[in-house]
Image (tube, helix red, strand yellow):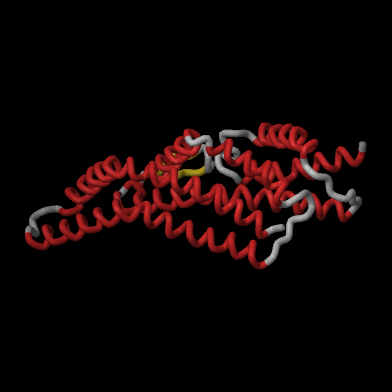
Amino acid sequence: MAEDLTHMALVSMRVMGVLAAGPVWSSRYLYWPVRALLAVYTGVALAPVVARAPLTQGAGLLLSAGRELATGLALGFMAGLVFSAVQVAGHLIDMETGFGIVNVLDPNLGQPAPVVGSFLYLLAMLVFLSLNGHHLLLMALADSFQVVPVDSALWGGGSLRVVVDASGEMFWIALRIALPVVGALFVGSVALGLVARSVPQLNIFVVGLPAKLAGGLLLLSLAMPAYVLMVEVLARDSHRHTMALLRLMR
């Protein structure tokens, strides 16, 4: 009985890590008690089909639990990098369009957030759900116990490098998402500056901000199909990166 409970607890710790850091499940819209119950329920469901690790006690058990939690957090973090890139891209667009001066309370973050950043994040979440990405995440979690059995994850230089490289790539992805809109608005700002030099009587501050807001909304609407397609590709790539990390942790 003690072995069964210990095994289920270790499995649940990895599940809890994924639910705490992964997309959708880590949202503040899903309260902590609900996430804890989901982790326990999923852990109990997976425990019978997951290979058992040798039973440890005392400090060894705490170390095993910490290792499983860290493994789950790493998996969730890798899967959620796409949404971090989307949020960074939204912040860049907000600063260039002028929406950065208007903040709304984002319940998911628990703090004020720019308008475009929140919009792009929610849109990416809808695309992720439409692709059954939450199912893919749970499938990757179940497969992780076959690739990396309970209490056997090895954190070496290779696995840490994958996490660091993926984090760095996130900023490049954010730049690629925001560059079409930000670049076009930058050209528009240069044009407005030339107009202001040519017509000194024109109050550029009165004309410039509404023009940039309207131009930003127009460019966002034109870029939306490409944006949705990019999120689909990135969501599938995140699954590939997650499995690559697991293979390095064996």
Say whether residue 9 is left or right of residue 248: right
Q: In this rendered view, identify the residue nearer to me: 249 or 42.
A: 249
Say whether residue 14 is left or right of residue 115: right
Q: Quadrant of residue 11?
A: top right
User: Can you give x and y, in whole percent of width and height, for residue 114 in the image?
Assistant: 40, 45
Query: Which residue is found at the position 27% from the left and 57% from the top?
Result: 183
Query: Which residue is found at the position 19% from the left and 60% from the top?
Result: 190
User: Can you give x and y, in whole percent of width and height, for residue 173 in the image?
Assistant: 43, 55
Q: In this rendered view, identify the residue nearer to me: 46 or 185.
A: 46
User: Can you give x and y, in whole percent of width and height, for residue 34 in the image?
Assistant: 67, 32
Against 198, residue 146 (above or below) is above
Q: Residue furthest bottom?
A: 157
Say whether residue 162 is left or right of residue 43: left
Say whether residue 62 is left or right of residue 120: right
Query: Which residue is found at the position 89% from the left and 49% from the top?
Result: 55
Q: Quadrant of residue 156?
A: bottom right
Q: Is residue 105 visible?
A: no
Q: Quadrant of the C terminus?
A: bottom right
